[in-house]
Image: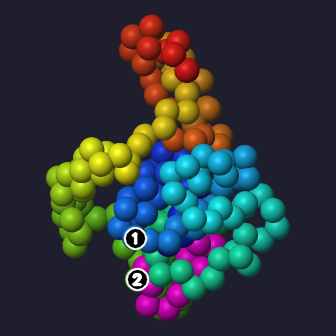
């Protein structure tokens, strides 16, 4: 399985769930995230900042894009015929999926052809109880710095989640 933007909150969560289900996980991220990604079970980190990362990833069964834009299109190109592609960061035109011989999923209402949100939350809860799922907090901002938090997150180089704290004592923890 390929996960683009694997160091971020969605990508790192998806990686842990995929590993718990027995997948071999390949993720795109800059090399500065390699130690963190290995600690959450990512099998192979491909540095997207070094040349053409798609030359290193071919014929994956599943690709999950968390970046969007050109990265989503590139990720689609790594999926083998008959494979599955999903993006939480945008849509790929149906004709591109058809041309690639790939099933593109996602974007529908909860329960539309997949597990319910309740089922997914139950699975994540079970994994957390077993110590197989952890949420890393990259940085916490006080609510008064919401704009700065958004800009920090928008830069796209986080390791896990960015938190807005309503309680100022919490915001000074990390």
SS at mark 2 in the image:
strand
> Residue 22: which numbered mark, if any?
1
Res 104 seen here: yes
Return the x and y of residue 114 as percentages of the image width and height: 23, 69
Residue at the (61%, 32%) spot, across then down: 151
Tell me if residue 156 can be seen. Answer: no
Give the Cα distance between marks 1 and 2: 21 Å
Residue in view at x 53 percent, y 87 percent: 80
Q: How many marks?
A: 2
Which residue sits furthest front?
Answer: 130
Judge whether residue 81 is colored magenta. Answer: yes
Contact (Cβ within 8 Å) of mark 1 with mark 2: no
**Residue corresponding to mark 2:** 103
142 to the left or right of 108: right
Tell me what residue is drawn at x 51 percent, y 41 percent. 160
- Residue 54 image label: none
Q: Does 100 appear above or below 12?
A: below
Taking the magenta stretch, the answer to whether it contains residue 21 is no
Say few, some or many: other residues with alpha carbon within 10 Å of mark 2 (under 14 / 14 to 19 / 20 or more): some
Q: Position of residue 6 (x, y in %)?
A: 56, 55
Residue 152 position, x and y percent, is 62, 32
| Image quadrant where residue 128 sits | top left
- Identify the secondary structure beneath mark 1: loop
**Residue in front for this viewpoint, 56 or 116:** 56
Residue 122 percent location from the top left of the image? 20, 51
Q: Quadrant of the C terminus?
A: top right
Residue 26 located left or right of residue 168: right
1 vs 2, front mark: 1
Displayed quadrant of residue 139? top right
Q: Which residues are magenta?
A: 74-84
């Amino acid at each position: 399985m390929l996960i683009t933007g694997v160091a971020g909150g969605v990508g790192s969560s998806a990686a842990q769930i995929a590993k718990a289900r027995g997948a071999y996980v390949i993720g795109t991220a800059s090399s500065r995230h390699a130690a963190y990604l290995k600690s959450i079970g990512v099998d192979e980190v491909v540095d997207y900042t070094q040349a053409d990362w798609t030359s290193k990833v071919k014929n994956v069964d599943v690709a999950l894009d968390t970046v969007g834009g050109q990265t989503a299109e590139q990720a689609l190109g790594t999926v083998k015929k008959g494979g599955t592609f999903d993006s939480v960061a945008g849509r790929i035109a149906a004709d591109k999926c058809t041309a690639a011989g790939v099933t593109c999923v996602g974007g529908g209402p909860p329960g539309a052809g997949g597990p319910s949100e309740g089922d997914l939350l139950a699975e994540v809860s079970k994994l957390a109880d077993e110590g197989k799922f952890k949420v890393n907090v990259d940085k916490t901002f006080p609510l008064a710095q919401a704009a700065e938090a958004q800009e920090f997150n928008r830069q796209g180089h986080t390791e896990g989640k960015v938190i807005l704290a309503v309680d100022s004592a919490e915001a000074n923890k990390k």
